[in-house]
Image: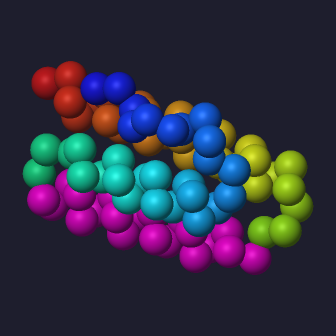
């Protein structure tokens, strides 16, 4: 399944958080959605004190790639 539209516009952690929550809606089961929503929330909270712009962009790019991989993994079946 293709990632959601607008992935190239993500520049801030809040935009990433909302994008990842929207990606969760594409997962097949409610239990998976709940699990990944919790993981997203924990990741967001653990990096909330990050203030280096370069590091933030690295985190955003990695999170987008991980989300695409997870969506591909569960929707391929």
Task: Kindly identify the residue that appears in the image at 64 percent across and 61 percent down.
Answer: 13
Task: Kindly identify the residue that appears in the image at 76 percent across and 55 percent down.
Answer: 56
Residue 38 % position (x, y): 36, 69
- Most foreground residue, 2 or 28: 2
Query: Which region is colored magenta?
Result: 30-49
Question: Where, quadrant-wise, is the N terminus in this rendering?
Answer: top left
Q: Please tell me whether residue 32 is drawn above or below residue 61 in the rendered image.
A: below
State whether residue 24 appears in this view: yes
State whether residue 62 appears in this view: no
Residue 58 % position (x, y): 74, 44
Q: Please give left or right for residue 38 compared with residue 74 in the image.
A: right
Q: Residue furthest top?
A: 76
Residue 23 % position (x, y): 35, 47
Task: Kindly identify the residue that appears in the image at 68 percent across and 74 percent down.
Answer: 48
Question: Where, quadrant-wise, is the C terminus in this rendering?
Answer: top left
Q: Please give left or right for residue 42 compared with residue 72 in the image.
A: right
Residue 41 inside the magenta-drawn segment: yes
Task: Kindly identify the residue that appears in the image at 56 percent across and 46 percent down.
Answer: 63
Quarter where residue 51 is shown:
bottom right
Residue 33 inside the magenta-drawn segment: yes
- Most foreground residue, 25 or 65: 25
Q: Main secondary structure of the magenta part?
A: helix
Q: How many marks?
A: 0
- Most foreground residue, 16 or 47: 16
Q: Please tell me whether residue 19 is drawn above or below residue 1 in the rendered image.
A: below
Q: Please give left or right for residue 9 compared with residue 69 in the image.
A: right
Residue 33 % position (x, y): 23, 57
Q: Colour scheme of this structure image?
A: rainbow
């Amino acid at each position: 399944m293709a990632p959601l539209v607008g992935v190239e516009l993500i520049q801030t952690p809040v935009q990433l958080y909302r994008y990842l929550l929207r990606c969760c809606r594409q997962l097949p089961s409610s239990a998976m959605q709940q699990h990944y929503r919790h993981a997203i929330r924990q990741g967001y909270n653990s990096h909330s004190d990050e203030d280096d712009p370069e590091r933030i962009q690295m985190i955003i790019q990695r999170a987008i790639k991980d989300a695409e991989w997870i969506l591909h993994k569960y929707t391929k079946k």
